[in-house]
Every structure is written in structure tokens, then in C-alpha cells.
Amino acid sequence: MLAKDNNASFYSNMPLDIFMGFAEKIGLAEGEDIDQIYEEIKDSSLLIEFGSGYGRVIEALQTKKFQGKVVGVERVHELAELLKQKAGNNVTIVEDDLCYLDWHKEKADTILWMWSGILELTPEDQENVIKKAYNMLVDGGRLIIECPFNDSISKVGMLSNDKKIVVKEAWGVLDATLVETKDIENYSSNAGFSSHSLRKYVTTTNLTRAIYTLIK
Ligand SMILES: C[S@@+](CC[C@H](N)C(=O)[O-])C[C@H]1O[C@@H](n2cnc3c(N)ncnc32)[C@H](O)[C@@H]1O
């Protein structure tokens, strides 16, 4: 495994039903976040998803009969294997770490980084991966980031001092760093995106979450 932190083992050791249960707790289990953005992404010919997990987003796209190609990038071997088993005709799974990913293939119209995936990286890596996403997009393409709105985090994590979140479970510990609107503004302009916007929404379990859209 190419991971450079311990968060990968949190996912490889987490029982699948518990992973899916977290999606229920947050109120995203039925692809509610994808409902929010589908109109703007539906015509993408290539959509890349960062950190595909157990396939929640890919399944939501398939339910909506998304016609474009989908590439899911996931670093946890067990999850990448599960995603490969479930992948339909237009889905390709790449087992890799976003921090090391070296993408020289077709540029994407849309990159999705949903359900707080960005929080699992250090601030330095958050910025580097956003710069990488910029280079993976066509001109006019969009990077969509979904995460808690500022510090409205769920009971799944505990906010300690500053912006660190530590999720301690029987099978492991996940270290995360909260991302706020001003961080996204900085990352976006440092990467060269031409604009960024924020949409807030409330999940089915009453959490306020953010969807940031960065346009190249
Ligand atoms: C909270 S889950 C979200 C899963 C999926 N995006 C969704 O919305 O349902 C975060 C996922 O990102 C993956 N991930 C975290 N850091 C990663 C990295 N550096 N490279 C690739 N995948 C990563 C984790 O293994 C996990 O599957």
C-alpha cells in the first residue's frame, strides 16, 4: 500500500456495514449530495472521483443513469477490490493514493471529492491535491468538494483543539483536519482556479454541509 499515513488502515480494518452506517448517520446514504449537484455534472464525458470508498457515489451516478465515463481513485486495497467487483461498463477503478497519483490520461470535465474526503489529508496535502486536480481538468472543468460546513461536524468525529478531528473507533484512529471556507478560497486561488463558490445544504439527519465548486 502506498499510503503515507495511518488513515488507510482505519478504512481497511473498518467493517463494511459500519462504513455504510456512517453514511446513514451523516444523511448521505442515498446519494443526497449527488442530488444537489447532478444537474451541473450530468453531461460530463469523464468524471473522476477522489477516494471512492465502498462505491456510494458511483452507485448514485449509476442510479441516475449517468452516461459518461467514471474513474474512481481509491488507495485502500480492500475497497479498490470491492469497487472493481461492483464496477459497471463505464467505470474504471484506479488503486492509488491521491498524494502520489500521476495522471497523464484524458482530462476530466468533473472531479468529485465528496463526504469529507479532503479532511483526511494534512493541510499541505489538501493544497497539493487541489493543485493536482486543477491539472487533471479540462478548461472550464469543475472540482466539487463536499464536507462539513466550517465547524458543523457530526458526532462521528470529535473536534479537538484548532482544526484537528480525531475519530477513535475499536478498529483504529482516523486523523483529519477541518476545512473552512477561507481554506478553500486560498487553495482555489493558489491552484489557479478562475472561480469558486459555496452552496450549503442540510442532510437528512440535519447536518449543515458545504459543497464547494471550483471552476478551472
Ligand atoms: C469518507 S470516505 C468517502 C467515500 C466516497 N467518496 C463517498 O463519498 O462515499 C473517504 C474515502 O477516501 C479514501 N481516501 C482517503 N485518503 C485518500 C488518499 N490519499 N488517496 C486515495 N483515497 C483516499 C478513503 O480510503 C475512503 O475510502
Image (spheres, grey):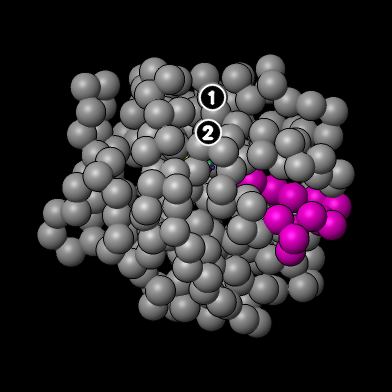
Q: Quadrant of residue 109?
A: bottom right
Q: Quadrant of residue 197?
A: bottom right
Query: Around disc 2, counting alpha carbons within 10 Å, would you say few (fewer than 14), some (14 to 19), or many (20 or more)?
Result: many
Classify mark 1: helix, strand or loop.
helix
Disc 2, ligand 1: is the CB inside 8 Å? yes
Q: Nearer the viewer, residue 184 or 5?
A: 184
Q: Nearer the viewer, residue 79 or 25?
A: 25
Classify mark 2: helix, strand or loop.
loop
Q: Which mark is residue 190?
A: none
Q: Residue at x 84, y 46 (%)?
A: 68
Residue type, numbered disc 1? Leu
Q: Residue at x 66, y 39 (%)?
A: 60
Residue type, numbered disc 2? Gly
**Pointer 2: what residue?**
53
Q: Could you say where residue 111 lies in the image, as x and y percent from the top left?
A: 66, 55
Disc 1, ligand 1: is the CB inside 8 Å? yes
Residue 160 appears in the rendering? yes
Q: Which mark is residue 79?
A: 1
Q: Residue at x 52, y 19 (%)?
A: 78
Considering the image in quadrants, where does the C terminus appear?
bottom right
Q: Could you say where residue 161 lies in the image, as x and y percent from the top left?
A: 13, 59
Relative side of 159 to 22, left or right? left
154 to 54, vertically: above or below: below
Indicate yes or no whether the magenta region holds residue 39.
yes
